[in-house]
Amino acid sequence: MAEFKVTPWEVSGDIDYDKLIAEFGVEKLNDAMLERIKKHTKELHFMLCRKVFFAHRDMKFLLDEYEKGNKFFLYTGRAPSGPVHLGHLMPWIFTKWLQDKFNVELWFQFPDEEKFLFKQEMKFEDTQRWLNENMLDVIALGFDPKKTHFIIDTRDAGLMYKEACKVAKKITFSMVKSTFGMTNENNIGSIFYTSMQAVPAFLPSVLKGKEIPCLIPHAVDQDPHFRLTRDILPKLGHYKPASIQCMFLPPLGGVEGKMSASSAAEQAIFTTDTPEMVKKKINKYAFSGGQVSIEEHRIKGGNPDVDVSFQYLRMLFEPDDKKLQEIYRDYKTGKMLTGELKAILIEKINSFLKKHQAEREKAKAKVEKYLLKR
Ligand code: TRP
């Protein structure tokens, strides 16, 4: 078995998601659960059908409550540390769908101290610059400002700190060591940090003075935080948050690990990339499951399962199942060439980014609407 690693700070190797389910103790999203979700949403998002969102915790509890009229709120987040890339957008696009379908509030956390504490070279001033940039990408996705609240750790510390302390008091250093693999060498801010990430899972309940269930859509690497959160919250008189977890969008160079802004810039497509940059990155760097020559490709066909362009279509850019299946078949039989497959993806990404970048510009005037009232 190839080695892989999934922690909130590092994702690498050929990830075996079934093994991860067992290791983390999350539940696989099975068809019965999808049907149950569909009862409320009428249709299923392709990220659910295709098991891009593949696991959960406590969805049964969440839907039981929902069916009793006890609505939940959504909670997700982003630690500002660099430009937003396509991999970040994946869970956020799904979160937007959940917000629309269930008509619920979203609390979006920007822990602007997280990467400052965890990354040696990160300056606090830089996290603030990225915070301002990253908020634009979230707004650009179209979240309803009336139902969406940005919670920024240092800005909203006045609201959060008291609650974080209540969480922190229940967490020992040895729990943090065993959950995150921390050591005596970690700075004490990073040891405390998980209590800040726990807060949005119950802050709306505190502010409204009644217990409201919480659903956290997130990439599976964040699960250790919420494992701890789930242990602690009942001790503070709150519900355990439910969660729904997605896989990682692979980096351009191959299906291992995840798209990351900190690895080589050639491995990620950023939301601010120009059409020419997208074209060049896909053509030059997107790992291909095709054969070395056209002749050979026509005879043997390509392998869509390892082809990064196909995976981007499957996970993010081609919602139409029929079209996706056609591409799969044509590529596998050799009827479609790698260049043709890449051209489809480039077109999809660039038309998405054209709209996204226009919305991102407009977002500059909207930030205020999303911030918490102080
Ligand atoms: N720790 C996450 C990151 O590194 C940010 C985050 C905070 C988050 N709260 C969250 C992510 C809730 C998912 C869900 O970007």
Image (cartoon, rainbow, N blue to C red):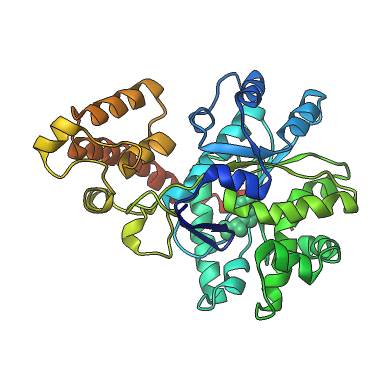
User: For the image shown, how many numbered marks are present on the structure?
Assistant: 0
Which residue is drawn at the image coordinates 54% and 54% (left, top)? 135
Quarter of the image with the C terminus is bottom right
Is residue 125 shown to the viewer in this render? Answer: yes
Q: Picture quarter containing residue 35? A: top right
Left-right relation of 339 to 208: left
Is residue 109 shown to the viewer in this render? Answer: no
Nearest the camera: 338 or 73?
Answer: 338
Q: Picture quarter containing residue 34? A: top right
Which residue is drawn at the image coordinates 26% and 45% (left, top)? 288
Q: Position of residue 371 (x, y in %)?
A: 65, 53
Left-right relation of 342 to 256: left
Which residue is drawn at the image coordinates 51% and 47% (left, top)? 16
Which residue is drawn at the image coordinates 42% and 38% (left, top)? 316
Left-right relation of 172 to 120: right
Residue reaching furthest to the left: 295
Q: Position of residue 181 (x, y in %)?
A: 65, 67
Relative height, residue 325 to residue 13 (above, below) = above
Q: Position of residue 124 (x, y in %)?
A: 57, 75
